[in-house]
Amino acid sequence: MLTEEQVAAYREDGFILVPDVYSTDEIAELNRVTDRFVETSRALTGSDSVFDIGPGHSHAAPKLRRIKNPTLHHPAFDKAMRHPGLIAILQQLLGDALRFDHAKLNIKPVGGGAEIDWHQDWAFYPHTNDDMLAVGVLLGDVGPKSGPLQVVPGSHKGPVLNHHSNGVFCGAIDDAEAEGLAETAVPLTGKAGSVTIHHVRAIHGSEPNTSETARRLLLFSYAAVDAWPLLPKEGIGDFDTRILTGTPTLAPRQIAVPIRIPLPKVEADDSIFDNQSHKQRGAAMMGS
Ligand SMILES: O=C(O)CCC(=O)C(=O)O
């Protein structure tokens, strides 16, 4: 559980580092499993749906930089995502009803490892409310040279910055808007078994790993159950080409209106007649 001061710090700064959430044994097991993924990656020549392979990768010097959706690929990761101590902490921050959103395991191998440019997770997946956060489980000790996650204090209370370049979403904050961020960002260093927690709107990033050991950060994103994604997974489609007057915008006008999500669907929901035939009617009602 978090102390009142830790909860207040999260609300104020948009991040906290919590030591000793996972035990030494739990971390050792997660590292054993991760080792096996690194071994498997040696034989690959490029990325696929599970492995994100970095530049300079070879059998002798694997540059696995991410395991995608690790909870789907090994039960140890799924178990870690459901860790009771962590869930209790998340309930303090997001409320009792939680949804797991997605996971990834970012690895910065020795001798570099991918730097991650400044960004806000919120820019990738806006929801109906921002009770969302990401947890980073430190699978090893992380020092200043390991390429620690860095977070800009208070940025979760600010605007969503521009993550577009040349007219497409590039997932990194525009250089002009990112200026000066590095000076204020706080590096989240700590011991294995600690977790970083950052708010979905917090600006964060990380530098390459210049230490002697790989940096492994197992990331889990969670949301309050009533936070619904605003975007379908598909792209923009013909949305803009259907504009009759005015110019396209990526900034929807948002007001606090009541919403109910029309899911799950019945089969053949493209006919209102079929659709309404699924309604359970009272004896005295129309159609009975
Ligand atoms: O691995 C890191 O240092 C940053 C992770 C991150 O922000 C991301 O993958 O979105």
Image: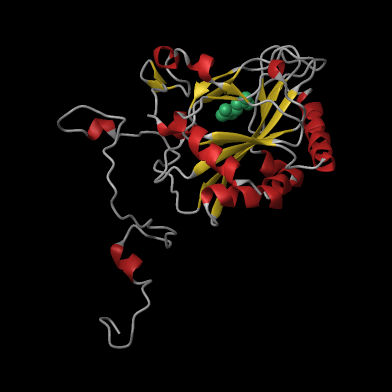
Above or below — where is 8 with respect to 124? Answer: below
Quarter of the picture containing the C terminus is bottom left
Q: Which quarter of the figure has residue 31? A: top right
Is residue 83 in view from this perspective? no
Residue 46 x/y as whole percent: 67, 21
Q: Residue at x 45, y 20 (%)?
A: 173
Which quarter of the rendered image does ligand 1 occupy?
Answer: top right
Nearest the eye: 220 or 47: 220
Is 50 drawn above or below residue 81 in the view shown?
above
Residue at the image point whose x is 52% and y is 53% from the top: 95
**Residue 210 visible here:** yes
Q: Quadrant of residue 263?
A: bottom left
In the depicted structure, whether residue 281 falls above or below residue 157 = below
The quadrant holding residue 253 is: top left
Please give the name of the residue rendered at 39% of the width and 29% of the height, measured from the top-left corner: 160
Expressed as whole percent of the image width and height from the top left, the position of residue 191 reads 76, 30
Vertical side of 136 occupied by 283: above or below? below
